[in-house]
């Protein structure tokens, strides 16, 4: 099973940090956010990962290279223009086999049990599964209402000016079947939350939400970034600090030009 990390955003809400670094390269516990995501994926037996990049893409490519020093195979899909969260996945269709795959945002700090979420997806025979968390304030997130079975009946993105329909929110982690790509045309911009997920609800497709335990926080704002730092130092994220692995910025962490494979 393969994983795709969405790492192409501009991170404007994290200025001035993202004036010099792409958001996935911002440091947490002395390593880039993306390093912790790769560690999580490896711990759940992913070995092949494609990273979609655009803004300051070379920083990510140079730091992680082809992934061999991490025990992973990394490929990069460089976008000339933003394609959205779903359009980015369509753009790497040739890389994907005819099997289930996982998508994860490159700006998350989490220790969610991905293996349990994948088992849930297969048990439900879902076309798409969104990993969900309960939060105190759901405004600013994609909000979901599910049936008792987990089937998603309502999906509303960022309900800023109306009462929230639920406190279960989209974590930016998806388990998907290849047929989801049929909902998109090549080289077009699509967003899962605005374009694809509402359509899945409207068509009554097997679209499920998996309510996860564990730690989760996006670092899309300075406030959230600072809170993630504090939580890591407090030991609230199980795989960070306590089980360090070698992603220090030494010579082995930098890619040689011939070692970087691009997904096209």
Image (spheres, rainbow, N blue to C red):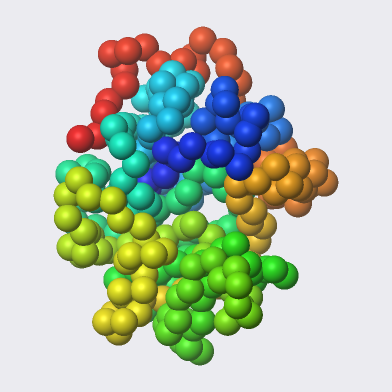
Q: Which of 44/59 is in front?
A: 59
Asked if one can make out residue 186 in the rendered structure from this viewpoint, the answer is yes
Tell whether 183 sits left or right of 247.
Answer: left
Question: Residue placed farthest to the right in the image?
Answer: 234
Q: Is 203 situated above or below 117?
A: below
Whether residue 72 sits left or right of residue 141 in the image: it is left
Camera-nearest residue between 231 and 244:
231
Q: Give me the residue at 71% from left, 33% from top.
A: 29
The reply to whether residue 133 is in sight is no
Q: Residue furthest bottom?
A: 148
- Residue located 64% across and 69% down the image: 138
Q: Is residue 210 left or right of residue 129?
A: right
Residue at the image position 52 percent from the left and 31 percent from the top: 22
* Quadrant into which the C terminus falls: top left
Residue 33 place in picture, x, y as percent:
59, 37
Q: Position of residue 39 (x, y in %)?
A: 54, 40
């Amino acid at each position: 099973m393969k994983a795709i990390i969405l790492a192409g955003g501009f991170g404007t809400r994290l200025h001035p940090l993202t004036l010099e670094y792409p958001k996935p390269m911002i440091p947490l516990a002395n390593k880039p956010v993306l390093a912790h995501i790769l560690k999580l994926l490896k711990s759940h037996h992913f070995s092949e990962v494609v990273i979609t990049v655009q803004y300051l893409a070379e920083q990510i490519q140079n730091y992680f290279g082809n992934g061999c020093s991490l025990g992973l195979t990394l490929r990069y899909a460089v976008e000339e223009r933003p394609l959205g969260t779903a359009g980015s996945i369509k753009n790497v269709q040739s890389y994907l086999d005819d099997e289930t795959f996982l998508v994860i945002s490159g700006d998350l700090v989490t220790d969610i049990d991905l293996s349990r979420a994948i088992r849930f997806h297969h048990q439900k025979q879902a076309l798409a599964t969104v990993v969900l968390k309960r939060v105190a304030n759901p405004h600013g997130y994609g909000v979901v209402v599910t049936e008792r079975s987990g089937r998603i009946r309502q999906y509303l993105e960022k309900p800023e000016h109306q009462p929230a329909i639920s406190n279960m929110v989209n974590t930016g982690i998806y388990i998907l079947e290849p047929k989801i790509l049929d909902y998109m045309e090549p080289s077009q911009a699509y967003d899962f939350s605005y374009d694809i997920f509402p359509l899945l609800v409207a068509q009554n497709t097997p679209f499920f939400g998996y309510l996860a335990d564990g730690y989760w926080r996006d670092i899309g704002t300075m406030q959230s970034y600072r809170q993630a730092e504090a939580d890591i130092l407090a030991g609230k994220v199980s795989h960070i600090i306590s089980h360090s692995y070698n992603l220090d910025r030494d010579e082995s962490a930098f890619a040689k030009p011939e070692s970087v494979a691009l997904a096209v």
